Image: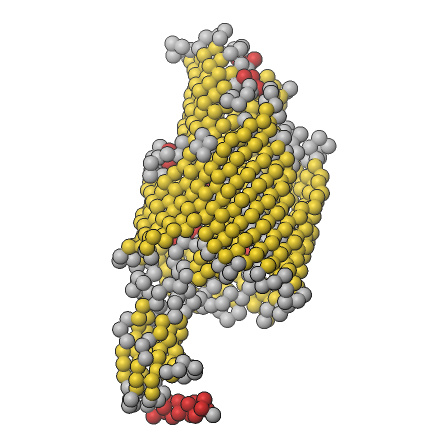
C-alpha cells in the first residue's frame, strides 16, 4: 500500500511540478564527461527507486523531483564505483539544484585473478594462460604485430634463428583470430612484420590449452585477435604514424564500424612503409675438406630492406533471430620487401693463399596472405551450436640475384679454381599454400554443476614449393642439379574432442578433456610421407579459497610437427662453404606439461614442469653424403626437460603509478645427438618482462617497458642473453584523440651473440663466435603517432561471436 501511494504521488508530482529538477555533470579522473551513466533518485531509507535518467554524451543530466521529502542521488556505471550523494531535503516545490562536477572513480574488480581497471593495461589470467590488452599500451600505435609480440610477457623472438619461444620453450603455434598459420616460421615473421598493430585488440598466450584447441605447439599457442567494435550507428578511427631509425617509417590507417539493430559491419585498412637495416658478423675456424683443411673465416653481412605493406580487415554479422547469428570475416595482408645484402668473407687457408670474397645479393619479394571465415551460431538456454568454415591462402615469391667477386691478399681480383667459387647465381622461390577447415562445436549444460562440450574438425591443405638456383657460367646462367627443389605436399588433419566441466562444490571445479588427432602428410615419395594418430588428454582442477584467491592444477599433452621445409631433402645455396637443407628423418616432438598456479587477485605464481621427447632444433651444422660442404639443417634432440617458476607481480605504488613484472626462472636439461659426441647438458635460464605506467596531469601518460632473456641453447648453439628497454609518452584529448611519442630500444642493446662449438666438437670441427644485430642494435627507433576517433561512442551488447573466435574459449 505504501509503495502504491508513493507511485500515485510521483505521477501527480510530474504533472504539476515538471520544473522541479536537479542537474549536474559526471566526469572521470581526467575531467572528461562520462556518457550513459545511470542516475537514480531514492528516498531516505533507500528501499525504493523513484525515478532515473542516463547522462548524455557530455556527461550532463537532468533529474526530475516528483515530491517533497528527503532523498539521495546514486550514480552508477560498469567499471566505476557507485557514487552516492549526501542526504538532501526538498521542503517545497518547485525545487532546483545544480551539483558541482561529480567525479566517478574507476572500480577495481577482482574476478578469478583478473584485474579490471578502466584504461589501465589489462593482463587477464585464465586456467589456460593469459590475455594481453595491447591497445592500452603507449607503444602499440604505429608498431607492427611482430613488435607487439616481442613486448608480450614471456614471448621471445630470436630473429637470427627465426624462432618464437613462450616462457623459455620453443615450439609455438601462432594463430590469427583463432586460425593456425601453418607456414614456415621465417615467412610468418615476415608476414607479422608487415601487419600493423593498430587494429590488434589483444594477444592470447595459451600455455595450457584445453582439448578444444589444436594440439600443435609444444610451448603453447599465441593467438593474435584483431579489433571488432560493437557500436550503434557509425564509428570510425584514423591512425597516422611517422618514425625513423636507420630509415624512415610511416603508417596510415582507417577503421570504420557500423552497427544497426540486427547487423554489424566493420572494416579497417592500413598501409605501412618501413626502411630497416640489420647486420651480422661471424669469426671462427672450420675444417671443411672443400677448403683444403683448417681455415680461419671472418664473415660480415649487412642487409637493407624496404617493406611496403597493405593490411585489410573486413567483417559482417547478422542476427537471424534471437540467439542465432551468422557472420563472415576476411583478413588480407600483402607485403613487397626489397632486400639488398652485402657480404664480405675473409678466408685464411692453411694450404692456399688468402681469399677475400665480396658478395652482393638483391631480392624483390611479394608475399600475400588471405584468411577468410564464415560461421553460424545458435545459442539456447542450455546449449550452443557453432559451425565454422575457413579458407586460408598464403603465396610467396622471392626471386634474388647474387654477384660475387674475389680478391687476393694484395687486393687484386682473381678467379679461384674451386667450383664452389661462382661469379654469380640467381634464385627463384615460389610457395603457394591453400588450407580449408570445417569445424563443428556443441556445448550442453546437463545440470547446474555439469556441462559437456564436443566437436569435430577437418583440415585439408596443399603446399606447392618451387625453388631453384642457377649458376653463372661465362655469360649464361646454368641450372645446378644440387639446388633444385620442387615440393608438392598435401596435409590432412582430422580431430575430435570432448571435454566436461564439473563443479564438486562452489569452490572446487574440474575440467577433463580428451582430443584425438590424425595427421597425414604426403609428399608423393615414401621417404617423406608421414602419418600419425594419437590421443591428447587435458585436465584442469581449480580450488577457490575466496572470490579473489584460487589454486589451479593443469596437465596437457601436445605435439610439434615438422613442416614441409623441415622434411624436404633439398639444398639451398648459403655461401661457398655451406647450404641449407631439410631433414627427411625428422620425427614429431611430443611434450607432457604439468603446472600448479596460485592466484591472489592479479598476483600469480606457478610451478611448471615439462618433458619433451624428440624436440626439434633448427639450423644445426650437419654432414650430408650428397655434399662435401657443411649442411645447415633441423635435427631431433633426444629430449629436453624443464622445471620453471613463473610469476606475475602487479605493483600499485600510487593510483597514478602502476608496475607489472612477469618472469620465469628454471632449469633446462637436454641431450643432443647430431654432434660427433652425444652429450647431455644442464643450464639455468630466466627471462622477464616489465612495464610501468604513470598517469600525469593534463591527460598525459608515460610507459616504460622492457624484456630480457638470459643465456640459452638452440641445439648445440649457445645464445648469450639479450633484451631491450622501450619508452613512450601519450597525450589524450577531450575529443577522444591521442598523440603518442615512442622510442624503441633506448640503449641500442638488441645484439644477439652466439657461440658454436662450445659444448662439444661440431661437424667439421666448427668453432665460431657470431653477432646478429637488427635495426635497433644500430639506431634507436623513434615514432610519433596520432589517433582520432569520430562517430557514435555508444557501445551496444555483442550479439554473438565472430567466426574468427571459433577456436577460443566460450564466452
Where residue 682 appears, x then y in whole percent? 54, 30
Image-quadrant location for residue 520: top right
Camera-side residue of 378 and 787: 378
Q: Is residue 541 above or below residue 300?
A: below
User: Is 804 situated left or right of 46 in this image?
Assistant: right
Q: Is residue 765 above or below residue 199?
A: above
Residue at figure coordinates x 43%, y 92% from the top left: 5
Out of 181 and 732, give the one closest to the viewer. Answer: 732
Give x and y (percent) for residue 369: 53, 45
**Which percent across, then down, holds residue 628?**
59, 17
Residue 408, located in which quarter of the rendered image?
top left
Residue 234 occupies quadrant: bottom left
Q: Residue at x 53, y 58 (%)?
A: 545
Residue 80 visible in the current orientation = yes
Location of the C terminus (image quadrant) = bottom right
Model colouring = secondary structure
* Residue reaching furthest to the top: 351
Residue positioned 59% across, 49% down in the render: 554
Amino acid at each position: 500500500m505504501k509503495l502504491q501511494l508513493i507511485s500515485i504521488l510521483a505521477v501527480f508530482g510530474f504533472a504539476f511540478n515538471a520544473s522541479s529538477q536537479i542537474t549536474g555533470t559526471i566526469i572521470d579522473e581526467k575531467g572528461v564527461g562520462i556518457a550513459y551513466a545511470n542516475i537514480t533518485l531514492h528516498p531516505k531509507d533507500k528501499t525504493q527507486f523513484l525515478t532515473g535518467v542516463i547522462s548524455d554524451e557530455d556527461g550532463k543530466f537532468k533529474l526530475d523531483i516528483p515530491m517533497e521529502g528527503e532523498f539521495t542521488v546514486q550514480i552508477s556505471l560498469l567499471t566505476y564505483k557507485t557514487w552516492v550523494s549526501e542526504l538532501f531535503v526538498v521542503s517545497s516545490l518547485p525545487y532546483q539544484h545544480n551539483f558541482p562536477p561529480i567525479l566517478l572513480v574507476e572500480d577495481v574488480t577482482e574476478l578469478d585473478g583478473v584485474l579490471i581497471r578502466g584504461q589501465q593495461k589489462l593482463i587477464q589470467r585464465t586456467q589456460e594462460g593469459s590475455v594481453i590488452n595491447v591497445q592500452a599500451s603507449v607503444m602499440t600505435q604505429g608498431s607492427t604485430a611482430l613488435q607487439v609480440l616481442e613486448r608480450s610477457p614471456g614471448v621471445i623472438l630470436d630473429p637470427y634463428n627465426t624462432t618464437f619461444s613462450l616462457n623459455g620453450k620453443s615450439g609455438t603455434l601462432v594463430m590469427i583470430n583463432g586460425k593456425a598459420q601453418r607456414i614456415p616460421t621465417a615467412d610468418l615473421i615476415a608476414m607479422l612484420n608487415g601487419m600493423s598493430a593498430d587494429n590488434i585488440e589483444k594477444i592470447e598466450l595459451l600455455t595450457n590449452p584445453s582439448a578444444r584447441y589444436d594440439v600443435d605447439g609444444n610451448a603453447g599457442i599465441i593467438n593474435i585477435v584483431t579489433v571488432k567494435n560493437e557500436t550503434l550507428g557509425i564509428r570510425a578511427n584514423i591512425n597516422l604514424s611517422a618514425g625513423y631509425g636507420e630509415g624512415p617509417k610511416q603508417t596510415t590507417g582507417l577503421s570504420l564500424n557500423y552497427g544497426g539493430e540486427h547487423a554489424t559491419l566493420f572494416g579497417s585498412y592500413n598501409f605501412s612503409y618501413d626502411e630497416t637495416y640489420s647486420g651480422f658478423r661471424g669469426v671462427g675456424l672450420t675444417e671443411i675438406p672443400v677448403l683444403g683443411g683448417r681455415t680461419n673465416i671472418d664473415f660480415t653481412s649487412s642487409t637493407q630492406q624496404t617493406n611496403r605493406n597493405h593490411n585489410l580487415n573486413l567483417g559482417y554479422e547478422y542476427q537471424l533471430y534471437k540467439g542465432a547469428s551468422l557472420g563472415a570475416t576476411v583478413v588480407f595482408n600483402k607485403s613487397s620487401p626489397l632486400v639488398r645484402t652485402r657480404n664480405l668473407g675473409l678466408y685464411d687457408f692453411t694450404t692456399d693463399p688468402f681469399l677475400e670474397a665480396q658478395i652482393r645479393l638483391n631480392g624483390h619479394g611479394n608475399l600475400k596472405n588471405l584468411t577468410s571465415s564464415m560461421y553460424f551460431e545458435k545459442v539456447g538456454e542450455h546449449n550452443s551450436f557453432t559451425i565454422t568454415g575457413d579458407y586460408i591462402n598464403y603465396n610467396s615469391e622471392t626471386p634474388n640475384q647474387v654477384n660475387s667477386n674475389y680478391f687476393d691478399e694484395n687486393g687484386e681480383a682473381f678467379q679461384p679454381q674451386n667450383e664452389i667459387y661462382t661469379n654469380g647465381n640467381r634464385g627463384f622461390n615460389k610457395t603457394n599454400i591453400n588450407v580449408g577447415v570445417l569445424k563443428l562445436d556443441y556445448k550442453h549444460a546437463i545440470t547446474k554443476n555439469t556441462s559437456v562440450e564436443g566437436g569435430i574438425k577437418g583440415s585439408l591443405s596443399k603446399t606447392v614449393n618451387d625453388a631453384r638456383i642457377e649458376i653463372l657460367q661465362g655469360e649464361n646462367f646454368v641450372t645446378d642439379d644440387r639446388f633444385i627443389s620442387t615440393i608438392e605436399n598435401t596435409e590432412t588433419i582430422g580431430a575430435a574432442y570432448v571435454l566436461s566441466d564439473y563443479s564438486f562444490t562452489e569452490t572446487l571445479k574440474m575440467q577433463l578433456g580428451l582430443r584425438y588427432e590424425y595427421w597425414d602428410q604426403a609428399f608423393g615419395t615414401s621417404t617423406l610421407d608421414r602419418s600419425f594418430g594419437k590421443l591428447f588428454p587435458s585436465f584442469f582442477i581449480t580450488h577457490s579459497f575466496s572470490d579473489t584467491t584460487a589454486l589451479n592444477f593443469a596437465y596437457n599433452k601436445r605435439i610439434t610437427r615438422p613442416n614441409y621445409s623441415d622434411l624436404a631433402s633439398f639444398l639451398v645455396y648459403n655461401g661457398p662453404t655451406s647450404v641449407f637443407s631439410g631433414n627427411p628423418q625428422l620425427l614429431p616432438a611430443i611434450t607432457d606439461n604439468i603446472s600448479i598456479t596460485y592466484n591472489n587477485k592479479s598476483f600469480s605464481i606457478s610451478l611448471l614442469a615439462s618433458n619433451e621427447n624428440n624436440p626439434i632444433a633448427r639450423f644445426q651444422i650437419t654432414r650430408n653424403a650428397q655434399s662435401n660442404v657443411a649442411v645447415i639443417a633441423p635435427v631431433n634432440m633426444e629430449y629436453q626437460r624443464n622445471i620453471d617458476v613463473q610469476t606475475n607481480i602487479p605493483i600499485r605504488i600510487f593510483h597514478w603509478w602502476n608496475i607489472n613484472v612477469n618472469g620465469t626462472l628454471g632449469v633446462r636439461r637436454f641431450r643432443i645427438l647430431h654432434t660427433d659426441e652425444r652429450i647431455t647438458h644442464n643450464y639455468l635460464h630466466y627471462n622477464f618482462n616489465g612495464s610501468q605506467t604513470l598517469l600525469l596531469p593534463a591527460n598525459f601518460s608515460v610507459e616504460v617497458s622492457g624484456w630480457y632473456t638470459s643465456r640459452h641453447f638452440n641445439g648445440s648453439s649457445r645464445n648469450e642473453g639479450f633484451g631491450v628497454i622501450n619508452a613512450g609518452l601519450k597525450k589524450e584529448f577531450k575529443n577522444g584523440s591521442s598523440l603518442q611519442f615512442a622510442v624503441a630500444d633506448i640503449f641500442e642493446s638488441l645484439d644477439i651473440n652466439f657461440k658454436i662449438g662450445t659444448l662439444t666438437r661440431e661437424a667439421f670441427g666448427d668453432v665460431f663466435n657470431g653477432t646478429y644485430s637488427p635495426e635497433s642494435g644500430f639506431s634507436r627507433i623513434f615514432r610519433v603517432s596520432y589517433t582520432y576517433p569520430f562517430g557514435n561512442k555508444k557501445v551496444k551488447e555483442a550479439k554473438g561471436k565472430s567466426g574468427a573466435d571459433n577456436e577460443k574459449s566460450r564466452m
